[in-house]
Amino acid sequence: MKTLLLIVFCLTLGTVYAQKKKKQDIEAIKAMCGCYDVSFNFSETFAAEKDYEFHDNYHSGALEYVFPVEETKNKIVLQHLLVIGDSMIIKHWRQDWLYENTDFHVFYKDNTWKYDRKTPDAVKGQWTQKVYQVDDSPRYEGSSSWVHVDGRSYWENTADAPLPRREFSKRSDYNVMERRNRHEITDYGWVHEQDNGKVVRQGSDKVIAREKGWNTYTKTEENKCQPAKDWWQEKQAYWNDVRKVWDELFAVKKTLEFEKKIDGKVLFMKLFALEDEMLQGDYDSTASIAKIKATINAYLKGDVALVTN
């Protein structure tokens, strides 16, 4: 009887701890929301070959609004919007946080993401960060535990990714970025720290250079991001439908491969142009979803396709 009571006590204690830990995790994820002055900094630090020509350091800054567009018990979706000047808004990256997620689309190379399924035990207590490109197409994702210790909260994971936008049109000497991402909540906002490997993937992997990234998100006056809030009110119906279509494609749970360009245009250019078209006048969700599916299907390779009516 004493043994049974001890087992029940331990199980109850474990459940209470897990619930408390999950609450801390959610608070840390949502702490990334707000209006920020952002500084982007990258520097190549090491190369295996002595004749490697190091590239110039990259520095940039922006005003960025981060906000939740969806939240359930086990999912938090954060959208990023860049604010340029007083009125120009650029839809930026998106990050989804999923609790104990088992379904992954892992970047391989050359616009290909391989489907992978993990066991529930492998992701127990973990959060998957799924990062999407400006058109909500896949980018990279990985699963790890949030750590809360000594007054600090951070999440760290390594995942393969396509080349970053700052390099994908300028470089062809590598085709995979191995990203070690670390998100840490600070007293001024948060930091996105990176230790990246620039990888040539041709059968085996060869790292040609290492890179340090240090992106700081410093909270600023919320009213500076009002143009972004207004923009989202006007555009959200279309982008909500874009997310729905992508979610339908990911639910197929197969490897996804895309054409790089069609008619000289990459996919995000087509989806952004479609936004302008569909938001003229009263918004028609049914018609919009049909055109979004047709646009994405045109870029899909292989036997995977979205079902259209």
Image (spheres, rainbow, N blue to C red):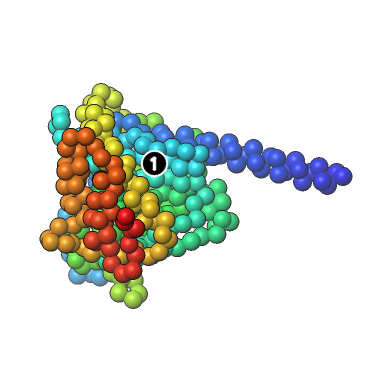
In the image, 11: left or right of 129?
right
Amino acid type shown at disc 1? Val
Q: Badge 1 is on which residue?
A: 77
In the image, residue 168 above or below residue 237:
below
Residue 58 x, y percent position in the rendering: 19, 49
Q: Nearer the viewer, residue 45 or 217?
A: 217
Quadrant containing the C terminus in the rendered view: bottom left
At 42% from the left and 56% from the top, the residue drawn is: 251
Quadrant containing the N terminus in the rendered view: top right
At 25% from the left and 70% from the top, the residue drawn is: 49
Residue 135 x, y percent position in the rendering: 26, 49
Choose top left, top right, bottom left or bottom right for residue 233. top left
Neighbours of disc 1 within 10 Å: few (<14), some (14-19), many (20+): some
At 53% from the left and 36% from the top, the residue drawn is: 23
At 50% from the left and 46% from the top, the residue drawn is: 99
Residue 304 shows up from this direction: yes
